[in-house]
Image (tube, rainbow, N blue to C red):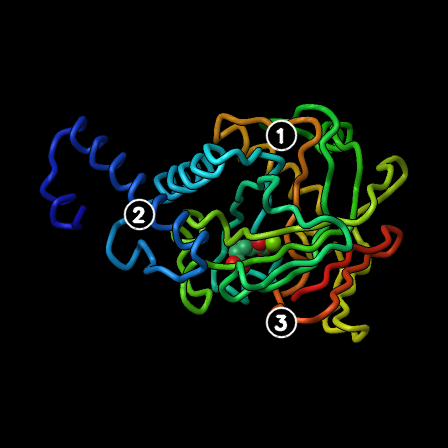
Amino acid sequence: MSNNRLEAVTGVEDRGHADAELVARLADILDEAAMTHRTVARPTDTTDLDLATAYRVQRAVIDRRLARGEALIGVKMGFTSRAKMVQMGVDDVIWGLLTDAMLVEEGGVLDLADLIHPRIEPEIAFLIGSPLSGTVTPAEAVRAIAGVAVAYEVLDSRYADFRFTLPDVIADNASAAGFGFGPWHDPAGLDPSNLGLLVEVDGRVVASGSSAAILGNPLRSLIAAARLAAEAGLELRPGWVVLAGAATAALPLPEGVHVRVSAAGLGRAEVTTR
Ligand code: OOG
Ligand code: MG
């Protein structure tokens, strides 16, 4: 549907119908882009996409994956650190949805032929132990956690040069492409608020930071995830993984390297690319 057609539409019902068509069309384009690993035009270059509609596109992209047999296994928070906001030129916390097809087995091999221009970033992951949704206190958030782990996220924007506005990147499921995590640690007595994080490529340290970069404390990211879940009519479910967001800027992920992400007290998560 062209922009002109959208503008010509009048009346609430027609408008809703036009939106549904737009959402489905954008979801088809973005889903296809991920499957064929080709970049596509940013929706906001030609349409007036607001945040709510962008999230509907994101859900529709995920629905296509679920229809192909993938399962929803968690959520990822985005732009929860200043380093990421500055790197990407945006200033709002967003989320994306994680499916089992995105999970890289620990110590596994990631085939970059399936990706466009992958990047990797160090994160903290929470394993949900009991349902969490809505406005929750820090104590409630802590009680819902069954495990904490160091994690990495592999990003792959479906837009050229990773350039996008907030609605574009929301529609593109927050650039989600892959993720992995190290061993789960008992959250009891574990303070995740200031853990040193390292990213090593072939044994060389290429980035370092602290979990404090994630909203001052990654627990705040979990609280934000619970709020966004409620807004989306979802709940964080037992067994789900919540990626709290990157603690440093993302790094280009080349072929044929071994990447190790480690966090003080949490061990490490490793991946090899080919
Ligand atoms: C969007 C995803 C941001 C994070 O951890 O901040 C994100 C992007 O940078 O392409 O995952
Ligand atoms: Mg991330």
Q: Quadrant of residue 239?
A: top right
Work out whether residue 174 or residue 90 is closer to the camera in this orientation and state it: 174
Amino acid, disc 2: Leu
Q: Position of residue 223 (x, y in %)?
A: 64, 36
Which residue is found at the position 55% from the left and 52% from the top? 177
User: Would you say 9 lies left or right of 157 here?
Assistant: left
Which residue is found at the position 56% from the left and 58% from the top? 155
**Dot 2, crowdedness within 10 Å: few (<14), some or many (≥20)?**
many
Mark 3 or 2, closer to the camera: 3
User: Would you say 50 lies left or right of 146 here?
Assistant: left
Q: Are marks 3 and 2 in contact (CB under 8 Å)?
A: no
Please tell me whether residue 28 is drawn above or below residue 263 in the rendered image. above
Amino acid, disc 3: Pro
Asked whether mark 1 and ligand 2 are closer than 8 Å, the reply comes as: no
The residue carrying mark 3 is 254
- Give the CA separation, mark 1 to mark 3: 33 Å
Q: Quadrant of the C terminus?
A: bottom right
Work out whether residue 184 or residue 124 is closer to the camera in this orientation and state it: 184
The residue carrying mark 1 is 236
Q: Secondary structure at mark 2?
A: loop
The residue carrying mark 2 is 49
Q: Are marks 2 and 1 in contact (CB under 8 Å)?
A: no
Q: Earlier in the sequence, mark 3 or mark 2?
A: 2
Mark 1 or 3, closer to the camera: 3
Q: Secondary structure at mark 3?
A: loop
The answer to whether any part of residue 217 appears in the image is no
- Give the CA separation, mark 3 to mark 2: 33 Å
